[in-house]
Image (cartoon, rainbow, N blue to C red):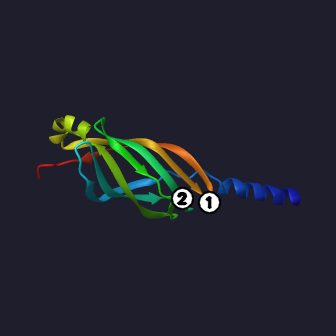
Amino acid sequence: MRTLLFLAFISLIITSCQAPKELEYRDVRKMELKQLGFNQSAVNFELVYFNPNKFGLDLKKVESDVYIDNIYLGKFQLDTLMHIPKNAEFVLPSTINIDMQNLMKNAAQLMFKKEVLVRAKGNVKIGKGRIFKTLPFTYESRQQVNLFK
């Protein structure tokens, strides 16, 4: 009986410590220019994600480099502890610092495109309670762009 109880306890621990499923990207909204400069500009926006896990998570830090058609756009950073609810959409307030000199050098080739490849590569620090793990991530998506509507 004790062996059966012990095995049930171990299986409960193993299933409750399963690796979290990847968060699902849904949308970008509320883009606004926070700071405009010759060397660097900052854009605020909200990223909408969905947590498909049956448990909540804590997001502690995000750092990534953002590229548009393999042209470096800037650095995305988030350094705030945020609780992510289980099985729910959530909004991630975000800021990207844009390298304006690099963007201006490549603006002509991006200006007339109808679709661009947006890529982000970086690390996210995520966990539950006081246990956090840094995980690498890569995001790629084709986005419609129409500057001349």
Residue carrying label 1: 129
Separation of residues labelled 1 and 2 (CA atoms):
8 Å
Q: Give the amino acid type for the residue marked by disc 1 in the picture.
A: Gly
Q: Is residue 149 visible?
A: yes
Tell me which residue sits at (26%, 53%) in the image.
35
Which image quarter holds the N terminus?
A: bottom right
| Residue 126 placement (x, y as % from top left) | 54, 52
| Residue 88 placement (x, y as % from top left) | 46, 64
Tell me which residue sits at (33%, 42%) in the image.
74
**CB atoms at circles 1 and 2 under 8 Å apart?**
yes
26 with respect to 109 (left or right): right
**Which residue is nearer to you in this view: 146 or 60?**
60
Residue carrying label 2: 58
Question: Is residue 20 placed above or below 138 in the rendered structure?
Answer: below
**1 or 2: tag closer to the N-terminus:** 2
Tell me which residue sits at (40%, 53%) in the image.
25
For residue 32, which numbered disc appears in the image?
A: none
Q: Secondary structure at mark 1?
A: loop
